[in-house]
Image (tube, helix red, strand yellow):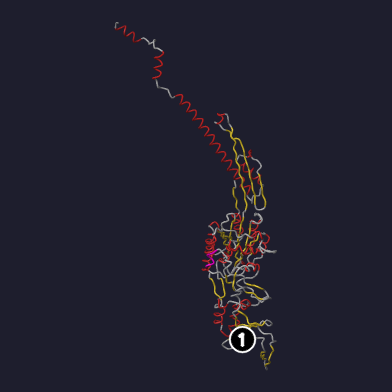
Amino acid sequence: MTAFERKDRSLRPRTSTSTFALLRAFRREEEGVLAKPMILITLLMLMVGGIGIDLMRFERDRTVLQYTLDRAVLAAADLDQEFEPEAVVQDYLEKSGLGEYYDTPYVDQGQGFKKVESTIETPFAAQYLQLFGDSELMLQARSRAEESIDDIEISLVLDVSGSMNSNSRLPNLKIAAQEFVDAIGLNTIDGKMSMSIVPYATQVSGPDELYAQLNTTGAYSNALNGYYSNCINFEASDFTSSTINLTNTYDRTMHFSPWYTSDYRSNDNRMISLPVCDERSSREMLLMEKDSGTLKTFIQNLVAEGNTSIDLGMKWGTALLDPSINPAIVNLTSGDTPYIDPDFATRPAAYTDKETLKIIVLMTDGQNTSQYYVEDHFRGDELMSDVWYHENTGLYSTYDPSEGEYYWDGWGYEDHPYGEGEYRSCGKYSCTWVDEGGVPSERLSYADLWADTSMKYVSDRLYADFLGSSTARNTYLYGAYDTVGGSEKNSRTQAICDTAKAQGIIVYTIGFEAPSNGQAVLKNCASSDSHFFDVDGIEISDAFASIATSIRQLRLTQ
């Protein structure tokens, strides 16, 4: 074969390739082998991604719907809400562009509670799920809100010291406190709220019914008027405890006055009119009351007089929330005419009772000042004084041991107390003997003397003429009583505030035109900075309103 023939043969197409050769070549070829699987996988990824987008859009829309509905029912369930719940829910939905899905909510309301429940169901237009033949999902939202006040125990501790008579403070307090009673009472289920009011000044006075349940010494009483001076001289250690221990023995504050020389037997019951422990019913604590009318009447009758003892007010406010006093409350809720409503026989509730809210609202316009108590050597019914009193004439006879005679107030010395003989009466030219009537004077115990006659009168009128003013006052005034000063009372206040808060009691405090020292005490006492209010004038109503709103528990129940 020539060279030309060989070249010509190589240029001719291979038309004689067999079928088997083509198959063998295809088997060896790898280019494009994954194209179809990749197309399938890509389509599946797009479908899954599209479904994911649909689900994200679904959850987004559902969240917006649920959030809007939650806000709507919360607003509708607010006890302060002026509009009908149905209108409130509809308004929220319409303003959010969801008004077309509104359905009338379920509403249940009564004294002290309001429940609103609403449900929305609406279709959701999917974009990718339609590839599987289901282009719609249902968006559903359900929300239920309730505002109510569960079991609540409140101690309203109010300053009624003399400074509350200034600048219309007492009238402004009365208005604010009465509004507070309405805000709490009218929005509380009957039997769920008990409120005690603790008026405090120099001391805190309690009703006879409560003191009959306590162990005390130094109780003063007389035949005309029964028991007086239902106040306790607490020790410093008592302020580190929230309790009133019903088995302990407490010293009562005697019925006495360290003020005003003119305060003596100045009324029909032969008692001083302005004692340290004020016995007037308007100054006694009101215990565990639920009736708004009774509470508001009590507040309206408050009167202002005396010093400021924030520590004592806070001590009693705390004690009336402490379970230790429950046995006394049980007794006061018993009988045919119970002193406290039987609904409250189980109160104060245990601190572990999570269904019961314990609240103290402490208000003052001042700062801690002196608290007075009679020294031990001048206390007691059995300890007799050297003063005699003649009932018919009102004349005092005071024995002077240095002279061995009796000094008749304003008359001079005689050898006997008035009423046990006769005395010599001398005119310009002659003297005569006058029969004293045969009605003897009564020797007074120190308990009777202090209850009937102010310490200043005793020192300045009954002893000063023969002892001298300085000696008389040092013995029968400054030597007869002692004080707990403002600094010590600040420490006691802080101790009882810390004790109350440690027990879970929520403490609100109001400084009503109070000085900086008083404000500092209140700030430290409050549960937090937001629980303290510094107000002037009619702003006190705003403070009480804010506290009432805070106390009310608004909660989402589903």
Residue at the extreme bottom: 429
Q: Is residue 17 left or right of residue 240?
A: left
**238 or 275, which lies in front?**
238
Q: Name above or below for residue 323 compared with residue 410.
A: above
Query: Dot 1 lies on which element?
Result: strand
Picture coordinates of residue 442, whole percent (x, y): 65, 82
| Residue 199 to residue 32: above or below | below
Q: Quadrant of residue 238?
A: bottom right
Res 199 → quadrant: bottom right
- Residue that carries the numbered disc 1 in the rendered image: 407
Q: How many marks?
A: 1
Image quarter (top left, top right, bottom left or bottom right) of the N terminus = top left
Q: Position of residue 360 (x, y in %)?
A: 58, 60
In percent of the image, x 60 and y 88: which residue is there? 405
Residue 501, picture quadrant: bottom right
Provide the residue span drawn in magenta: 237-241
Mark 1 belongs to which amino acid?
Tyr
Q: How far across and down, in percent of the image, does residue 435 sit?
A: 69, 89
Magenta stretch holds residue 238? yes
Residue 422 belongs to the span the image colors magenta: no
Residue 338 versus residue 228: which sits nearer the camera?
Answer: 338
Residue neighbourhood size for the residue with mark 1, other residues' Cα within 10 Å, grouped as few (<14), some (14–19), many (≥20): many
Q: Residue at x 40, y 14 (%)?
A: 20
Q: Front-most of 148 and 327?
A: 327
Q: Nearer the viewer, residue 302 or 330?
A: 330
The location of residue 429, given as percent across then percent down, is 67, 94
Q: Main secondary structure of the magenta part?
A: helix
